[in-house]
Image: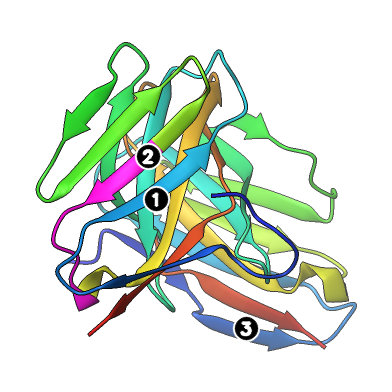
Amino acid sequence: DTAVSQTPKYLVTQMGNDKSIKCEQNLGHDTMYWYKQDSKKFLKIMFSYNNKELIINETVPNRFSPKSPDKAHLNLHINSLELGDSAVYFCASSQGQSLGEQYFGPGTRLTVT
Amino acid sequence: GESVGLHLPTLSVQEGDNSIINCAYSNSASDYFIWYKQESGKGPQFIIDIRSNMDKRQGQRVTVLLNKTVKHLSLQIAATQPGDSAVYFCAERTGGGNKLTFGTGTQLKVEL
């Protein structure tokens, strides 16, 4: 009965590779997000989708491309991975774009070597 | 709490005492604020929220206070328990699309 799930939980890869992280929510929410948490625990939004439409796109390298096949899924594809991409990536979801909490997934720890 | 250097600000309290975690937010136009708790190895978990037209809101063992004059938010935890040990983040909604901007976090350590 996991609300927001992410796969994989851990991802270790080499510089230059391309990787994807998947996210699924079973809460019936229509808005989903990707956040990046760095080694100092700083949490910053990257993208947000509402009903498969991109609504928030922060200053993120274009090597990062989110894809939302339907409103229950938001995947994150990263091309040409760099050392600085190492972080924990969190997916979240909420109902609509109005005030309300965002439900976070368990995170994916990405390590680029 | 403010972030300094490489280390999160840390608050150490004795079990059973009350905890107060502070947060200075940046945008006077922010209309909504949330406190999240993040345990080690897990995603942030919602604790309590408050809208900008309120100055206090209470939940179970937690109270959030909002002072818009000085752009300050605090989280009070009553009778702190070992399970409260975590990193606590405040977040403000700074624009459309439910965009949340997170503060730097405070590590709460509960000593037995």
The disc at residue B74 is 2
Write down the chain letter for disc 3. Answer: A
Image quarter for residue B103? top right
Which residue corresponds to the image point at 49% horizontal and 31% vertical from the top-left? B92
SS class, disc 3: strand
SS class, disc 2: strand
The disc at residue A38 is none
Any magenta on residue A106?
no
Circle 1 residue: B21
How far separated are the C-alphas under marks 3 and 2?
36 Å
Circle 3 residue: A11
Residue under disc 1 on the same chain as residue under disc 3: no
Marks 1 and 2 in Cβ contact (< 8 Å): yes
Which residue corresponds to the image point at 39% horizontal and 50% vertical from the top-left? B21
Q: Where is residue B50 in the image (x, y as percent from the top left)?
A: 30, 27
Type of residue at label 2? Ser
How far separated are the C-alphas under marks 1 and 2?
6 Å
Q: Position of residue A9 (x, y in %)?
A: 49, 80
SS class, disc 1: strand
Type of residue at label 3? Leu
Q: Nearer the viewer, residue B112 or A75?
A: B112
Q: Give the range drawn in magenta.
A: B74-82
Task: Specify whether residue A81 is in view.
Answer: no
Type of residue at label 1? Ile
